[in-house]
Structure formats: structure tokens, C-alpha cells
Amino acid sequence: MGLITLEDARRMSDQGTRGPVVVRQGEVLTPGARDYLQEHRIQVVYPQGRETGEGGHAAPAKYRTLFGAALNEKPEHMTHLKENILVFKDHPRIAFRGWIDLLEAQTLLAQREAAQGGWPRLAEELGQVLEFVRRYIRFDVLGEKLENLTLCGMDAGQLREYSHYPEKHFGQGHFLPAHTDPPALLAVNKLRCVVRQTELAAYAAFRDADGNVTRGDMILGLNRLSSLMWIMMIKLKAGKYEHSPM
């Protein structure tokens, strides 16, 4: 079972010069292949006909694709978008989920660095971050909305305010991290970078053809999470976290 791609259609039709193209049972034309064959007026033949169920009625397919194909087996290069809908593994939504996985992994590493480095309050706050990140798969797969955004006791407005004007709130201005900073600070800085990349992946996954976003709540959440990372770095630099070396 597999998909007949545009390149397959070109090869099977000798670059659009001859036909018919035979689509065997379990094979499906991709939209590009179908359009190519139609454009070149190449006949498509299904020698086994369509699968039927009891009484001669069409058997329901186990999987569907976004381009209208019905499949009874899942190709290795496709995966679930939701329910029985399959997409290619490089689909932007799947790529976004990969960034969420990485973000979760990096949060765990930063949390361990904070705990082992003697920053218990920071480790606790990173635990709250981890819980927040893990909710993102539900936001995506189940379509749940991110409402009443609060991270470590700060709402969306406070997160923006504190990260933009840290000297006013923490007595510490913006700074560039250095190798002499505590490992926990550097771990949070790396986590901040992963958050920013995840935010970009979210925009790619949830924008329409005109560039408008369909899940602004999720993108806002990641933007404010990036602000929180910067606030954590500022607080570490300013000595606002109690330090208890092990």
C-alpha cells in the first residue's frame, strides 16, 4: 500500500506522453499526481475496482487524508493529525509537536540543573512551566483553548511588563549571558531559545494562506513563556532566588 506521487505519475506516464496509469488496490494518487495526469489527459485505471463491503456498498476506509484519499493502512511516512486523519510527517502541525517534545525535554534538563545547583524555588517554577508545556499537545490535538493565561503567578500583562522593564521591577537591567554565569542561568537561557523556536513553529502550523493565525491563544502563550524565561534569568542575575548549594 502506498501513495503515487507526482514523480511516480511522471515516470509511469513516461513524462505525460502515454497511458494509462494503473492504480492498484491500496494505492492512492496524491493531489499533485492526479492534477498532473488530468492536465496531460492520461487515463487512470483501477483494475481491482473500489473496495466494497457487505451488500456491495463501499466499505468505510480506516483512514482519511487532508487531500481526500481513503486508506485502510497507514503508510510509514504518514502519521495521525487527529482521530483518523493522516498527514505527511513533515506537516507543520506535526513539526510543531516535535518542538513541543523538545521544549518539554529542555525544561526537564533546566529543572534538574536548578535543583542540583541549589535553586529550589527556580526548580519549582520550572515544574510549573513543565505542566504548562505538557498541556500544549491537548491544545493542538483536542482543540482546547488556552484561557486565563497565568505562569508562576503572573498573568500575560505582567509577564510582558516585567520582561520589558526588569530594572524597574527587579533592579537588574537587560544583559548578555556569559560563560561565567551560573549553569542554571545558562540552562534557562537555552530553554528560552527553544521556546522562541517553538513559537515560530506554532506560527507556521496555525497560519492560514493570508498569514492570519487560527490559534492566537497558543502563540500568545509561547510568547509569554519566552518572557518568563527572561524574567527567570533576570531574577537569577539579581539574586532574587534563594541559593542553597548542595
Image (cartoon, rainbow, N blue to C red):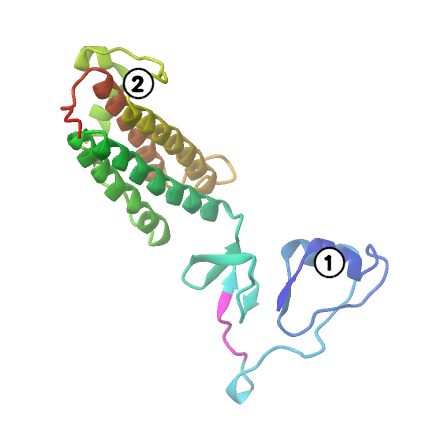
Query: Across the whole image, how many numbered discs are drawn on residues?
Result: 2
Q: Crowding near pointer 1: few (<14 within 10 Å), some, many (20+)?
A: some
Q: Position of residue 109 (x, y in %)?
A: 32, 37
Please determine whether, in this image, residue 189 is positioned above or below residue 177: below
Q: Is residue 38 visible?
A: no
Q: Provide the residue designation for mark 1.
A: 8
Q: Are marks 1 and 2 in contact (CB under 8 Å)?
A: no
Cα separation, mark 1 vs mark 2, equals 55 Å
If the image is split into quadrants, where does the C terminus sit? top left
Q: Crowding near pointer 2: few (<14 within 10 Å), some, many (20+)?
A: few
Q: Amino acid at mark 1?
A: Asp
Q: Nearer the viewer, residue 57 or 15?
A: 15
Q: Provide the residue designation for mark 2.
A: 181
Does 232 sit left or right of 65 as displayed?
Answer: left
* Rendered residue at 53%/65% (across/down): 74
Point out the stretch of residues depicted in magenta: 58-63
